[in-house]
Image (spheres, grey):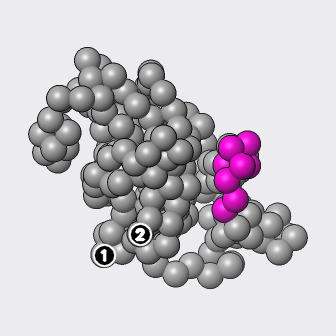
Amino acid sequence: MLEKALQEWGGHGDLWIFGYGSLIWKPDFDYAERRPARVHGWHRALKMWSRINRGTPERPGLVFGLLSGGCCQGMVFRIPQASGREVLTRLWQREMVTAVYDPRWLTCHTTHGPVTALAFTLSRSSPSHTGTLSEEEYRRIFDGACGIYGTTLDYAERTLEELRRMNIRDRHLERLLRLVRGKG
């Protein structure tokens, strides 16, 4: 899949990456430019099982996926053409460890016009898609799921903090965090 993504990019111009979760606050790559962006037809959802990064096989955590429907505000990162292959290869090692995402090239709308960026989407038919979770299941996951990068709760709080810093409102995430803090 990495080779397919590299081929689709083509290497003839700068590489754009769309971030909607931890890539916003921890990109782990150098970029030449970062812009707020919106994608239509997709939304951020804390509905992907994480059995390594934010949980374990015995106690899975959650991470964000980009699911079809709605719209999503996030950030696009421009990586210079010369370092595009190296950055995408390293990003692939981080995001595609278990190959659960469906990488797609999406049109991202910015104040400087549209750009086509690679985004890591999640299919509802994926075994990593949680489906509908009850409030009690969210509470249980937020209460104790922890993986190599920390807890699901920390991941969700850091994402919300960065979204707020960028003046992006995510009502669903706000509601989930109120719920698990006993204020919802």
Dividing the picture into quadrants, the one containing residue 81 is top left
Q: Is residue 165 visible?
A: yes
Q: Is residue 72 above or below residue 164?
A: below
* Element carrying mark 1: loop
Question: Is residue 10 magenta-colored?
Answer: no
* Residue 76 in the figure: left or right of residue 150: left
Q: Please report the bounds of the magenta region as a residue range.
A: 163-170
* Element carrying mark 2: strand
- At horizontal 44% and vertical 65% (from top left) the residue drawn is 40
- At horizontal 59% and vertical 37% (from top left) the residue drawn is 25
Q: CA distance from mark 1 to mark 2?
A: 17 Å
* Residue 151 in the figure: left or right of residue 183: left
Tell me the mark number nearer the camera, choosing from 1 and 2. 2
- Towards the viewer: 177 or 56: 177
Dividing the picture into quadrants, the one containing residue 137 is bottom right
Identify the residue under disc 2.
41
* Residue 179 in the figure: left or right of residue 183: left
Q: Which mark is residue 10?
A: none
Going by the numbered disc 1, the residue's amino acid type is: Ser
Q: Is residue 95 visible?
A: no
Q: Would you say the magenta stretch is mainly helix, strand or loop?
A: loop
Going by the numbered disc 2, the residue's amino acid type is: Gly
Q: Is residue 136 above or below residue 96?
A: below
- At horizontal 70% and vertical 59% (from top left) the residue drawn is 169
- Towards the viewer: 160 or 118: 118
x, y percent for residue 146: 59, 50
x, y percent for residue 176: 70, 68
Q: Residues within 10 Å of mark 1 (few under 14, many from 20)?
A: few
x, y percent for residue 56: 48, 53
- Towards the viewer: 5 or 176: 5
Identify the residue under disc 1.
125
Q: Residues within 10 Å of mark 2 (few under 14, many from 20)?
A: few
